[in-house]
Each structure stands twice: as C-alpha cells, then as structure tokens.
Image: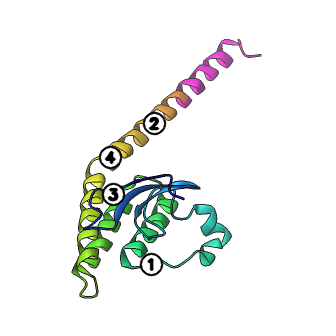
Amino acid sequence: MRVGTFRPWNRFTRLEWRKMPGGGVSTYRGGRYCGPGWGFTRDDVVSGRIRELPAAIDAIDAACRSHDQCYADRGYFTAECNRALASDLLEVILSKDSTAQQRIDAAIMAAIFEVESLTLDIAVGAYRELRWDMERLFYLLSMEDAIRRVADGRDR
C-alpha cells in the first residue's frame, strides 16, 4: 500500500519520494536504504540485527547503506558522511558495471549530497557549536553564581 508518491522523472530514473506505511521515506525505487528513516538504526547495529537486514539491491543502495551507517556513527547532517556518499556515488557513475540509469541516478544523488555538505551541513555544524558554547556559558555562569552565593554565605 502506497501512502504517497512523488516521481518527477519516473521514465528516466528510479529516484522517488515515497512515504512508507511504517514511517520513513523511500528515495530510490526498489532500494532498501536510500531515504530518511528507511535504512537501519544505531540499535540495529549495536544489537547485531544489522546482519539480519536484507542486502542492498545494487551499488547505489549499498552506498546509501554505508551513508546510514555513517549517520548512525557520527550523527545526522554530517558533512563527512554526505561527502563520503557523494564519493561512493561517483564510483557508481564511473563503474563499467553500472547501467545508464544508475549513472543518472547516482549523478543526481551525488549532486544533492555534495550541495548539502556545503550548505545545510555547515549550518547544522555551526548550530551545534553555538549550542555547545551556550551550554558551556550557562554552566560557567551558574557555577560562578553558586560560588558567589557560597562566598557571600547565602547558600548555607
């Protein structure tokens, strides 16, 4: 049962945006690991369940699986993970074993993730650093306040 599907280039590519009944979104028709919430989780890796999950259907799906693993290890929207995916997809583009359709799909996906690594990932990284700095600042201010209260004899 399909919940919702968007396939702008249906005749030329396997790329899609399809909501799955159990959650997640598939972005590569027939694939098992391309799309948010559509691969495996860190719990699957830690528990060993990853060995029970089905194999990738092709080189693009395998690149997505590696990308999912990188996100599980390093966090979402990590430039390093997105650049690694773009690099893996470049290998699909250059492989003599890839079909013309796989080359087109890999080129589109690689471009998307390369741009994401240069834009969104930088913003997310800056946000994470700002948040860390603010948390440290609030911690230091609260520690300074606690020290001042003890020194003033108000915290007895």
Image location of residue 35, percent across then percent down: 44, 59
In space, the residues marked 3 and 1 are separated at their CA atoms by: 19 Å
Which of 19 and 141 lies nearest the eye of the viewer?
19
Per the image, the residue denoted by label 2 is: 131
Element assignment for label 2: helix
Whether 142 is among the magenta residues is yes
Viewer-side label of 2, 1: 1
Q: Are marks 1 and 4 in contact (CB under 8 Å)?
A: no
Which of 137 and 94 lies nearest the eye of the viewer?
94
Element assignment for label 1: loop
Which range is magenta?
A: 139-156
Amino acid residing under circle 2: Arg
Amino acid residing under circle 4: Leu
In space, the residues marked 2 and 4 are separated at their CA atoms by: 16 Å
For residue 95, above or below residue 73? below
Per the image, the residue denoted by label 3 is: 7
Viewer-side label of 2, 3: 3
Viewer-side label of 4, 3: 3
Which of 15 and 148 lies nearest the eye of the viewer?
15
Pointer 2 or 1: first along the chain: 1
Q: Residues within 10 Å of mark 4 (few under 14, many from 20)?
A: some
Q: In terms of image quadrants, where is residue 155? A: top right
Per the image, the residue denoted by label 1 is: 57
Pointer 2 or 3: first along the chain: 3
Pointer 3 or 1: first along the chain: 3
Per the image, the residue denoted by label 4 is: 120
